[in-house]
Amino acid sequence: MSVVLRVPAADWRAHQRRVQAATPGLVPVAKGNGYGFGLARLAAEAAALGVDSLAVGTPAEVAAVRDIFPGRIVVLQPWRPGEPGAEDLLADERVIHTVSRVADLEHLSASGRRPSVLLELLTSMKRHGLTVSELTEVRRVLADDSVDVVGWTVHLPMPAATGGNAAEAERLGKAGLAVRTAPLWFSHLTGADYDRLRATLFTQTRLRIGTELWLGGSVGRRTLATVLDVHPVKRGERVGYWQRTMPADGSVVVVSGGTAHGVALEAPTSAATGRQRLISAVNGSVEALGWALSPFTIAGKKRWFVEPPHMQASMVYVPGSKSIPAIGDEIPVQLRLTTATVDEVVLED
Ligand SMILES: *Cc1c(COP(=O)(O)O)cnc(C)c1O
């Protein structure tokens, strides 16, 4: 009774190796839901790649990877005093803390532990980071060598939104280097921009990649749900929590996969306008009823939700008497892997 992610292991790992070969200084990112694979799985993949550092999102995520990945662990979310687990993490010498405010840098500097830090520079993202005008103060705090500066970090917007980030990356990188010579860590540079910056910046560079590394390439990944039950229904019969009326004879198919897996109720799409609804109504289509298309495919077609997904299962409608799946059949379910939680990841030969 589960949702399964099936991955051709050899293809997936060949893709990872291609990204690694094209990205000197690669730092894999494993955070949140682990891009659908889970943090432990990605930590193992990163260990197999032989990289020296792995990035996680939050202090709490360090525990999910630290016994599996043997290298250094970067926490991407900036270190803040009082954040759950943040103070304890200072005792872990494998962890690299991201610092985005002068006050936090002072706090770390006074901790007496000489923690390893990445100094984050504020970019046009406007998420977190030190501004260039704060760098004089940063220089002052760094003067007594009370923190170990692992590098400067520059988290850029999506290149597709800006037409490329090379100029901003170079400007900020140089501003950091003027204060302290250290490696430059980037996020969201195109490969071409990264190559060019590596050639011009005269310092070690690192590039943090998640989505493209784990979910990119033409790897034949499949997410599959299981048919749990099939019930014939008559036209006019009312079913489900919400006792919706069935538009024609057919079947209600109960499948694994619900809100807990990230199965969402997409808004009704094609029948948005009144005119379209009228046309659908004349054709006797469920679109006329304002039903929503589900991400589940049965016999080659996306099927309509009978009602919003339940926590761990969903009910979809198959009209007529053909194309009825059997209990136990695996059917494709379209999930966005950055928001999905699958029950099982199966690496296939
Ligand atoms: C999430 C994140 C990344 C990885 O982003 P992808 O788009 O998944 O490659 C890189 N850098 C930072 C700071 C992040 O928060």
Image (cartoon, rainbow, N blue to C red):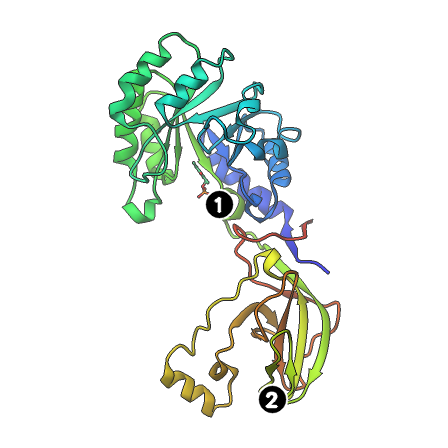
Q: Secondary structure at mark 1?
A: helix
Name the residue at the top extreme: 144
**Image coords of residue 92 (percent x, y):** 58, 20
Mark 2 and mark 1: Cα distance apart in space: 43 Å
Amino acid on which disc 1 is placed: Thr
Q: Which mark is residue 201?
A: none
Q: Nearer the viewer, residue 212 or 343?
A: 343
Is 266 left, or right, of 176 in this rendering? right
Quarter of the image containing the N terminus? bottom right
**Image coords of residue 161 (percent x, y):** 31, 48
Quarter of the image where ligand 1 sits: top left
**Image coords of residue 114 (percent x, y):** 48, 13
Q: Nearer the viewer, mark 2 or mark 1?
A: 2
**Image coords of residue 327 (percent x, y):** 75, 71
The answer to whether residue 225 shows anywhere in this view is: yes
Q: Nearer the viewer, residue 78 or 215?
A: 78
- Residue at the image position 45 percent from the left and 18 percent from the top: 108
Residue 233: quadrant of the picture: bottom right
Label 1 CB, ligand 1: below 8 Å? yes
Q: Secondary structure at mark 2?
A: loop
Disc on the earlier residue, 2 or 1 = 1
Q: Which mark is residue 211?
A: 1
Q: Which mark is residue 248?
A: 2
**186 shown above or below 146:** below
- Residue at the image position 71 percent from the left and 83 percent from the top: 232
Amino acid on which disc 2 is placed: Ala
**278 shown above or below 206:** below
